[in-house]
Amino acid sequence: MGKTKTSCGKQRPKTTLLLIFAALIFMTGILPGAIASQQVSGADEALGIKLAKQAVRSDKHWTTTDHSKMEILKQNFTSGDQITQACLSCHTDASMQFEETIHWTWKVPSEKEGVMNGKAGHAINNFCISGNAMEDKGCLSCHAGWNGTQGEVNCLACHGKEKFNYKEAFEDLKAFEGDDDPDTLEIVKEVQEEVKNAVHQITMPQRENCGECHFKGGGGDGVKHGDLDTSLAKPNKMLDVHMAAEGADFTCTRCHTTVKHNIAGRLYTRPAAAERTSLIEDDMATKITCESCHSNLPHKTASKMNDHTDKVACQSCHIPEFARVNPTKMWWDWTKAGDLKDGKPYVVKGEFGKPTYKSIKGEFRWEKNVQPEYFWYNGSFANTTIKEKIDPSGIVEVSHPLGDKNDPDARIHPFKIHRGKQPYDKINQQMVAPLLSGPKGFWTTFDMNDAIIRGNKTLDVPYSGEFDYVETTYAFPITHMVAPRENALSCNECHIRENSRLASITGIYLPGRDRSNFIDTLGIIAVLAALAGVMLHGLGRFFTRNGKEE
């Protein structure tokens, strides 16, 4: 029992054969794979999930105020400014705080002398190009004021639970003013009650509040970001595990935490988060990075994936595609703008029911289920402003992530790269900011040269009078639409020679993608040496036992 006959008539312990067999299996990678499979299936919950549950135990908010019982909110309001004044009677510093933030000023100081970033500053983009110092009225539909930049802060833009058209209601009240007809007075009373009911519905900001502007940035649903559109108002778990009702059901402010109305997030050249700190280490830290809740070791103990977090952003694996429900705009060509049919502007729609051509804007291309492009990213961007020189002989990077392989704060991160063609000053070799909306904007006159003259004037930037078009790119970091873990990328999406997702990340050695004869030779020698050692050990045991019984 327990012996195996050999060809020479001697006996060898079964354990020796098993040892050699196991070594051969181990060297070919079969055994490690089986062990890893057992570890994954039998291990406890990943550390990152446990920590996240501790960091965000509950998203329940409670209040000591029933706004419907406050006397000052029972008045008949005739303007938005009156509503804000009523809010400020209790929340005395709210307006002052908000007016210091980028959500009101649309400006961010730049490190470059004489340059102001932001939509109301010298920043430009390659979709609607510029906010023209807040002179472009088309942009002001997203400004959080009752009357553009002139009125009071519209508190209900962020804190109003009920979506209500206050502008239309106040216009109706003004139109009916002085009319004593009983039917008219009844209508006025109904409108006043509707306004009051809406004012009483006060809440912490919900996804719909933030999405009213951010889902529709750039001029429409899904135009701008790719990972932010109206599908995230009520997403399912397959679209976003954090925001889904059957998932974590997070609101935007769950991660974009706020101090004195300053909302954590991307700020042009400045990092969105100065530190990658876990809430377990510091419970006052902003929750804007994945590490805030999941730590820098989010996976199961001894998981190889934990070795990636110092170089690869969590989003790179956990957001395999963006624009998974609604399409996003990937190309915008202003050179085609201005064509008319029978002297009138026209629109052509494509496969997604989205416009592929508009006389006022040019030619577009939309895509769904888009694979991101990957770059090193330390949280900051290099931005080309209207005041800087460009090289029109190549593609101008209007916005591009900063960071490289030697930057300790940089990670390989996914991006949407929006491409297009837009006007620039041929003589001064600078980008330009045409005025688009309004009676004298391009959308009315279709005169690009005149629109540039007027638009540059709003920013006090000289214009030579001659323009042409240049191809541009604009980078948007992809960080929403986090897929369930079973849909995260597999290893061979990146670690493969052909069609690697990280083909653009050069200057580093990526196992599976790259080949080094020196490293391959060392690997082969190591494998052969290990195999020879196991076999010699087995043979040594065979001959030294001399066929004796155990």
Image: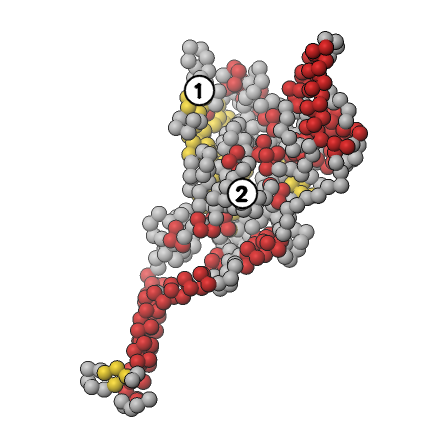
Q: Residue at x 35, y 59 (%)?
A: 516
Residue 286: where, in percent of width, then height?
64, 48
Q: Is residue 114 above or below residue 542?
A: above
Local SS, label 1: strand
Q: Which residue lies under the disc numbered 2?
A: 244
Question: What colour scheme has been applied to the protein in the rendered image?
Answer: secondary structure
Check disc 2 and give the amino acid type. Answer: Ala
Residue 33 visible in image: yes
Picture coordinates of residue 308 (x, y %)? Answer: 48, 56
Q: Are marks 1 and 2 in contact (CB under 8 Å)?
A: no
Assign the C terminus to one quadrant of the image. Answer: bottom left
- Is the residue 349 above or below the residue 107 in the image? above
Q: Quadrant of residue 420?
A: top left
Q: Quadrant of the N terminus?
A: bottom left
Give whichever of 473, 481 is nearer the camera: 481
Residue at 58 percent across and 39 percent down: it is 268
**Residue 349 x, y percent position in the rendering:** 41, 24
Residue 328 in picture, x, y percent from top left: 46, 33
User: For the residues carrying marks 1 and 2, which lies nearer the camera in this image?
Assistant: 2
Residue on which disc 1 sits: 347
